[in-house]
Structure formats: C-alpha cells, structure tokens
Amino acid sequence: MIKDRLLVAILAATTLVGACTTSSTKSINPISDQQTTYFADPEERELFDESERLHDEFVRKGLIYRDSALTRYINKVSTDIQPQIIKEKFELRFFVMRDPSVNAFALPNGNIYLNIGLLNRLDNESQLAFVMAHEAAHIINRHAFKSKVSRRNDIVGAHIADFFLAGTGLSYLAAVSNIASYSRDLETEADERALVFLSTTDYDLSKVVDTFDQLKEVKHNKDSTSIWASHPDALTRKKSATTYIETHGLPSHSNTVDSETFQKFKAELTEATLKMRLRLRQYQLAQETAEAAILHQGENALIHAYIGDSYRLRLENQLTAAQERAWLYDEKTEIAKQYIDDNLVIFEQQANTHYQLALQLSADNANAVRGTGLLLSYQGKTSEAIDYLDRYLSFEKIPDRRFIEMKVKQLHTTNNEK
Ligand SMILES: [Zn+2]
C-alpha cells in the first residue's frame, strides 16, 4: 500500500515537470482555499512572468499615475474588502492607470489597474469597492489560468513583444486582453464573488449593483476600448447580481455608500481625464466627461474652458473630429465628415459660449483666456486674438508659453501683411 502511494506521488511529481500538468479547469481552486498552491504549474508561472513584464512596460511608458494620497486611499478600501485569508496568503496590489477610458483590469500576478477615467466615472465609493472586488475575484479565482487551460492552443503573449513597438503608450490593451479577458461564466463568477467579499463589509449591497448603470452608459457611448464594456450586458449583470444577493441572503448593510474622500479624488481626477481625452483627440468624449462633471460637481470655470476647447479643437481638426464621430457612432467616415461640416457654426458658437461662461465665473481663468485667443485666431480676428493671447502670456504659471509666443509672432506677421 505504502509503496503504491509512493509510486503515485512520484508519478505526480514527474507530471509536474512536464509542460501542461493541469488538464482541467475543475482542479484550479481559488487562492483563498487554505490548501491551494498556485504558480506551481509552469503555465501559471508563465502568466505570472508575463504580468511582471507587462507591469514593467507600464512603468517604463509612464502609464502608472503616481499620487501617494490616492494610493493610500485605494489601499485602505482594498484592505476593507479583502477576505482575511487573502491578506495572509497573497498580495493584491492596486495601481491607477493614466488612461481616460472607463476601464479596470487585473493581471494574474495580483496587480489590479484602475483607470483614471473609471475613477472619474463612478458615482461613489461603494461602486469603486465593487469594481475592486470584481477584479480581485478574477485573481483569487485564478481566472487567467482557467482561461489559459481551456484555450490551451492559443499562444498567450505572442502579441506583447511587437505590440509595444507601436509606441503610442496607451495601446497596451491588446496585450492585456490576451491574459485578462474571460468568458461570460467567469465574469458572472467574479461578480458573485465580489458581492460575497463586500457582504462582510459596511458597503450597502443594494447600492453596489448601481455600478452596472455606470457601465451601461459606457456602452451607450461606445467607449469600446473598455474591457468592462465588453463584459456581459450591464443590465443583465445588474439583474443577476440583485437576484444573487436575494437568493443567497447576503446581508445588505446600509451604512456606507460614499465617502467625502472618494468625491475629493473624483473631482481631482476630472481635470486629468479631460486633459488626456483632449490629448488623445477624443473631443466629444471630453465634452461628455466635462458635462457630467458640471452636472455632479456644479458650475466650474475650468471645466467650461475645457468644453470650449473640445469644440474649438473640432474646428481646428475637422478630419480627426470626423474620425472620432465615425468611431463613436459606427458611421462611415464620409457621413461623419458631413456631420462635422454641417455643425461647424454650432461648434464655433458653443466654443465661444463656454469660454464666456468660464470668464464670467472667473475672469482670470487662464485656460479660458487662452481658448478665447485661439478661437479668435481661428475666426481670423487677428488683433483681438493677439490681445487675449498676450494676456494669457502675462499669467505666471502656464505650461505652453513657447507655443503661444510662436502663435502671437505668427499673428503679428499676418497682421502686418494685411
Ligand atoms: Zn471582469
């Protein structure tokens, strides 16, 4: 008997050395099970190494947003939502990603990334806690490994090397999708586990499910780069989650829905989100982000100046504006071009209106002064444009002094030629 057992043990050990030891996803237990060992299988180990490589790339490309106060806050929420056994056995690390799209994802090595655009979109802290718990559940239930085993023939990571050669910084999603996109069943499992994690906290589960409404909005906007948007339909998920809470009798606490700290960070991240969207030439998406911010946070000169920018930039970059429109509404570029063409007068009026609103709220708003100058320049009102841009240059801290100085020089030349 003993000999037989030894033989079995030796056989088991031998298979472990082979390339594919795990033949069925059934044998992949959650990390939270006391007996579970992980990263022992070479295939899972590979996922770990790939995650580490990806993270290094994020750091190298400057994609990680560093803000120690925000990091401390997220780590606090993270501590609150994690089951005790996980804290003892495994380390989950949260990072904020310099990306304006509404997205979050988890890598199998325990790293979880929350985009600035997601933090800015969520309504309250309990929604943040839910997204964090959902991503944590993917890691704890080893979904990347399960997915890899069930589609063994895919060569995971084949894209990663050439992918980053594209070099646009934000184009990391294909590489991430390779190791962090899951089946509908696994998504449902992550939602359910997340609810179980949160049921031992003070978060109000009946409010937590509203997170799906925020994701639905994303889908409506066709923010299709979002991994969250490609999750099973948001409304279906909300219904299933609500049913799950009821049928499993999960305690619904009514204590914590939001915190002032969450709202403070959310407001701070609005400007970062807007800047990134405009830099990525997502003019309409920037406008939508800004309008939502005014709706939630009230009138704000800076936000109006950004809305002005979103319209002015569409005037200055009509082809890009058409491309964005085509992508957002699944239109042919020709039709989108026509739309932009038909709306140029409205864009001009809107840009002007929002800059004026900003200046009424705060006469010294540098962004609005700058925007007005650039709009006047677009309209060919050279002298007035010079006045505004000179005024902008008189402000102390401006990030684009050289660019505006050049612009003023050009305007003087144009003026003299008249
Ligand atoms: Zn998911």
Image (cartoon, grey):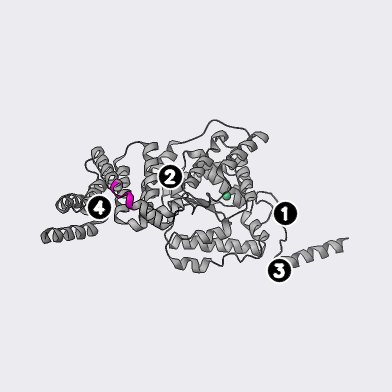
Q: Amino acid at mark 3?
A: Gly
* Mark 2 beta carbon near ligand 1 (under 8 Å): no
Say the numbered circle drawn on residue 120: 2
- Numbered circles on residues, count: 4
Q: Are marks 4 and 1 in contact (CB under 8 Å)?
A: no
The quarter of the displayed image where residue 404 is located: bottom left
Residue at point 51%, 68% (across, down):
161
Q: Give amino acid for label 4.
A: Ile
Identify the residue under disc 1.
26
Residue bearing the label numbered 3: 18
In the displayed image of the protein, which residue is found farthest to the top? 254
Whichever of labels 3 and 1 marks the residue nearer the N terminus, that label is 3
Q: Secondary structure at mark 1?
A: helix
Q: Quadrant of the C terminus?
A: bottom left
Res 398 label: 4
- Magenta stretch: give its range: 341-345
Q: Nearer the viewer, mark 4 or mark 3?
A: 4
Q: Earlier in the sequence, mark 4 or mark 2?
A: 2
Gap in Å between the C-alphas at discs 4 and 3? 60 Å
Within the magenta stretch, is there residue 279?
A: no
Question: Of the residues under marks 2 and 3, which one precedes in the sequence?
Answer: 3
